[in-house]
Image: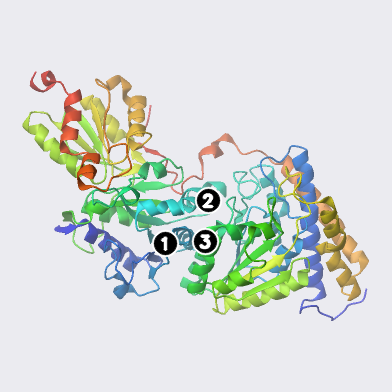
């Protein structure tokens, strides 16, 4: 094997292959999730990240381990990329006690204090104000870590988006707001929902830099995010990124996607697959061999399989879990002074 | 002990907690330069500076979310919302976020957050500024709802709320800020628990359960009733979530009669919830149906005459008590 000292966007071969592996893992994990959902092993809502892998992987590669992320309900990818074991993510989807949230959260609610994964959120844009607050805590304590907050193009229509950007700007909070513009808020095409055709004027309105980038190019995502992160870390305040991407599947598992054509989907899959684009680039620049790419993919498939097996074999929560974790002090609605008979 | 106002008691609690713990800070609309809409935070900006006394934009959703985030990030924020009416703009952050995180994320996050806000009417603020919405929030698992009625409790309970590891909604009352009462000397650290009511008056004929401003009206009514020989026991709930259930049940077992006096509307409110609890836990001890004293079931009118008619007064309480306490019981 040729050991190359070449770098791409200052990333070493090892780092690039790691990014490729993560993208492959997210793809295979989500495919496996879809399969298990169809088998009835996963309930409720489930929103897949397929097609958007370059956004999460590119952005999170630009973070430090002690940086924190908040995300939307389409968050399996962010949690895994930030370091969460795919087994505990899958177990959470299965509603098992071994899940990251003990099976009490589900697809939209991944959390890890250690990894700085501060949740997906089932309410559109609700994570944006909270992200500002986490960033405020870092600034207040004089820490130099930062927050990355992911949301979709639908969140831009919520008031919370505007309030959060304004607050982050006036307080110069160390947060990067990353809009994953996958073109549709559920079924509403973004050009019908937005009064402007890009986020740049919105960034300008809140007096922060904004960048619009190709979310199918993981290197471009990484390089832009790196600048945004450095800016936030050095105390210069927030930035707004509009990362243009496309989800290859419906909004959720139950969405037949009547609002867009199969031709449009096929066009994106055939020509704009972020994993394919990255692989071609790695091969062209001699940063990876086909064998390495294949090995990454095989390993990703295996890890996804293993995650599903782990989830399947994990126990359900015991019924005692129903009433735990509501309050830190275990207080309940009624406060008794005596033992009840 | 000194006699100070409810407003000053709150300010002392905030100041002492900020002095005690560097992580405690306050944020809200017009709390710094303006000194707080009801002057609770007056002087704190000068004492602690802009890092710890933070004016915010008029954006209830983001400031509430940011306070939640700051709590998640290791701080102990005290957020002031100008009134409980405006908390509706932040209701997603309170109900869907603050109340849910601990459970939804399997017991990992901690949100030591206090949201202070006045509720209630009586100052001709009209329909959108006079609501008492505590029952909405008390309905939600994951929150605590404190409603002190006296300066002593205002200070002691606010200190407890700041030290509590859970989200606490701290509901004050616009007409209580100038009320005076005895409070231990400044710097004399004391706390009042968030899960204990207080017996304000002992009596054997009827139990009047109340909380917040109307406690003071109830106490006047109880004085009047005493002149007629009716001894009312008065329970100040102090918190509506958790509820000090045994304090209520013990009293009901003694008096066998209950009047619930509250400022909020009757239907589906705190009082009806309490009545259901009393029927559940003490039905066999009840000698009469529970009586409710509430504000009129209308949006609060502006007119002074109509507003006065909408809010319940001493006579309403006396009447409700007499409806369930027979003369024979008193003089028999």
When the figure is inspected, residue B242 is found, relative to residue A219, above or below; the finding is above
Sequence-earlier tag: 1 or 2? 1
Distance (Cα) linking label 1 and label 3? 17 Å
Badge nearest the viewer, 1 or 3? 3
Q: Identify the element where label 1 is drawn.
A: strand
Is residue A337 shown to the viewer in this render?
Answer: no
Estimate how packed mark 2 is, as few (under 14), some (14 to 19) or many (20 or more) residues with alpha carbons within 10 Å: many
Q: Is residue A313 left or right of residue B307?
A: right
Find disc 2 in the rendering and name its residue.
B101
Q: Are marks 2 and 3 on the same chain?
A: no
Looking at the image, which residue is at 86% across and 63% down?
A271
Distance (Cα) linking label 2 and label 3? 15 Å
Q: Identify the element where label 2 is drawn.
A: helix
Provide residue A128's location: percent of width, then percent of height.
Answer: 56, 61
Looking at the image, which residue is at 67% across and 57% down?
A192
* Quarter in which the C terminus of chain A is drawn: top left
Q: Is residue A233 left or right of residue B251?
A: right
């Amino acid at each position: 094997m040729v050991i190359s000292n070449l770098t791409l966007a200052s990333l070493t071969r090892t780092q690039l292959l790691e990014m490729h592996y993560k993208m492959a893992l997210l793809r295979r994990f989500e495919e496996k999730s879809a399969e298990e959902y169809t088998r009835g092993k996963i309930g409720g809502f489930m929103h897949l990240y397929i097609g958007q892998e370059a956004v999460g992987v590119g952005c999170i590669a630009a973070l430090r381990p002690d940086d924190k992320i908040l995300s939307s309900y389409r968050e399996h990818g962010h949690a895994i990329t930030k370091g969460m074991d795919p087994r505990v993510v899958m177990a959470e989807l299965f509603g098992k006690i071994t899940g990251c949230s003990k099976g009490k959260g589900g697809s939209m609610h991944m959390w890890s204090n250690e990894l700085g994964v501060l949740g997906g959120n089932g309410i559109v844009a609700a994570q944006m104000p909270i992200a500002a607050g986490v960033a405020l805590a870092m600034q207040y304590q004089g820490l130099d870590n930062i927050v990355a907050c992911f949301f979709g193009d639908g969140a831009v229509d919520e008031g919370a988006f505007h309030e959060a950007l304004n607050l982050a700007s006036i307080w110069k909070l160390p947060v990067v707001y990353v809009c994953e513009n996958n073109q549709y808020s559920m079924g509403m095409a973004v050009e019908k929902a937005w009064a402007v055709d890009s986020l740049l004027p919105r960034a300008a309105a809140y007096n922060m830099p904004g960048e619009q980038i190709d979310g199918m190019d993981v290197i471009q995502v990484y390089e832009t995010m790196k600048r945004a992160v450095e800016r936030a870390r050095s105390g210069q305040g927030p930035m707004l990124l509009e990362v243009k991407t496309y989800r290859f599947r419906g909004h959720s598992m139950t969405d037949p996607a009547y609002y867009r054509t199969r031709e449009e989907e096929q066009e994106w899959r055939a020509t704009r697959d972020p994993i394919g684009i990255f692989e071609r680039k790695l091969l062209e620049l001699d940063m990876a061999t086909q064998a390495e790419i294949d090995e990454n993919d095989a390993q990703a498939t295996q890890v996804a399989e293993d995650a599903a097996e782990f989830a399947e074999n994990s126990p359900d929560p015991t019924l005692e879990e129903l009433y735990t974790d509501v309050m830190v002090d275990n207080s309940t609605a009624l406060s008794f002074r005596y033992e009840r008979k | 002990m000194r006699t100070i106002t409810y407003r000053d008691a709150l300010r002392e609690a905030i100041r002492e907690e900020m002095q005690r713990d560097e992580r405690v800070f306050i944020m809200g609309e017009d709390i710094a330069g303006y000194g707080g809409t009801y002057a609770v935070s007056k002087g704190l900006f000068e004492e602690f500076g802009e890092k710890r006394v933070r004016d915010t934009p008029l954006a209830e959703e983001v400031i509430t979310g940011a306070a939640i985030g700051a709590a998640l990030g290791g701080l102990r924020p005290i957020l002031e919302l100008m009134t409980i009416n405006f908390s509706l703009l932040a209701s997603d952050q309170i109900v869907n976020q603050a109340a849910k995180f601990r459970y939804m994320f399997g017991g990992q996050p901690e949100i030591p957050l206090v949201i202070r806000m006045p509720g209630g009417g009586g100052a001709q603020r009209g329909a959108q500024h006079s609501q008492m919405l505590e029952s909405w929030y008390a309905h939600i698992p994951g929150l605590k709802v404190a409603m002190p009625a006296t300066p002593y409790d205002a200070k002691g309970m606010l200190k407890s709320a700041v030290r509590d590891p859970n989200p606490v909604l701290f509901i004050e009352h616009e007409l209580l800020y100038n009320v005076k009462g005895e409070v231990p000397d400044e710097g004399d650290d004391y706390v009042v628990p968030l899960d204990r009511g207080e017996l304000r008056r002992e009596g054997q004929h009827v139990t009047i359960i109340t909380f917040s401003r109307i406690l003071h009206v109830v106490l006047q009514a109880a004085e009047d009733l005493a002149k007629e020989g009716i001894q009312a026991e008065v329970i100040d709930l102090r918190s509506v979530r958790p509820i000090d259930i045994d304090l209520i049940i013990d009293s009901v077992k003694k008096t066998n009669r209950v009047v619930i006096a509250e400022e909020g509307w009757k239907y589906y409110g705190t009082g009806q919830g309490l009545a259901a609890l009393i029927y559940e836990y003490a039905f066999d001890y009840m000698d009469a149906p529970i009586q409710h004293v509430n504000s009129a079931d209308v949006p609060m009118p502006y007119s002074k005459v109509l507003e006065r008619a909408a809010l319940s007064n001493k006579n309403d309480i006396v009447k409700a008590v007499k409806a369930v306490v027979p003369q024979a019981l008193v003089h028999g």
